Image (spheres, rainbow, N blue to C red):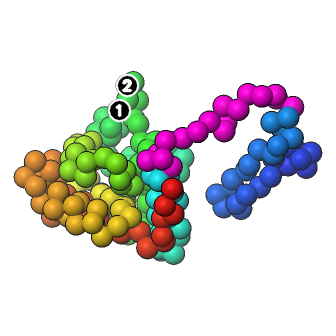
Amino acid sequence: LNGLEQTGFLRRVAVYPAVYQITKSVVRLVGPDMSARRPHRVPSVRWRLAAVSFSLDAKQWPAEFIFLHEKKVAAFEELGCPRQSLPHRGGQPYLWEDLLVDPHDGGLCLTIVDRPHWNPFRQLRAFVRRYSAARSSLAEKLSLTVAVGSNARRRLYERAAKHPKVLAHAKGAHEAATVYQVFTPIPQV
């Protein structure tokens, strides 16, 4: 990456986490293939902006984000959670989409970012159900959080967290999931 940066093909956009942007010189060399610049649907862009806003808010927490999938699985195993209790896809543990935060208190916090164009009840129920087996083995060492971008969405999630169909998958936890409202404003697209 340093070599590509020195030759002008990449430009560092952020120091931590290391984020690079492909410069226009690469696009000119490759030709008219603009697959990297394909148009994205507005709801997907808003969801990604919400994830960035959550990350900016959480930078001030006394906690550490775990980004690499292998380290996420290892963090669960260190707490005594068997691999078969984690969500699986294709026979392997699958934690790619969820944000794992280690608050350094002997537990883990899994966070999803609200997709504002999806139903809050269904998102929360699927999230709590996906980690119900892991919660059975870790008990109070695993907390679940949903990051939302507005008061209205926060109220919808708080109401959904009390629903019996969601609580059925909470596996004895005192609450199905906590709701965190992002304070960094999410730009409107």
| Dot 2 amino acid type | Gly
Report the residue marked by disc 2. Answer: 91
Q: Camera-side residue: 39 or 169?
A: 39
Report the residue marked by disc 1. Answer: 88
The magenta region covers 29-45
Q: Residue at x 49, y 61 (%)?
A: 188
Q: Was residue 30 drawn as part of the magenta stretch in this picture?
A: yes
Q: Was residue 177 drawn as part of the magenta stretch in this picture?
A: no
Extreme residue in the front direction: 189
Question: Where does residue 50 sit, x and y in percent of width and height?
Answer: 46, 59
Q: Residue at x 21, y 61 (%)?
A: 156
Question: Where does residue 46 sit, x and y in percent of width and height?
Answer: 47, 53
Q: Camera-side residue: 140 or 117?
A: 117
* Mark 2 Cα shell of 10 Å, populated few (<14), some (14-19), many (≥20): few
* Mark 1 Cα shell of 10 Å, populated few (<14), some (14-19), many (≥20): few
Is there a contact, CB below 8 Å, between mark 2 and mark 1? yes
Question: Where does residue 183 sit, x and y in percent of width and height?
Answer: 43, 73
| Dot 1 amino acid type | His
Extreme residue in the top direction: 90
Above or below 84: residue 137: below
Q: Residue at x 16, y 62 (%)?
A: 159
- Secondary structure category for the residue under label 1: strand
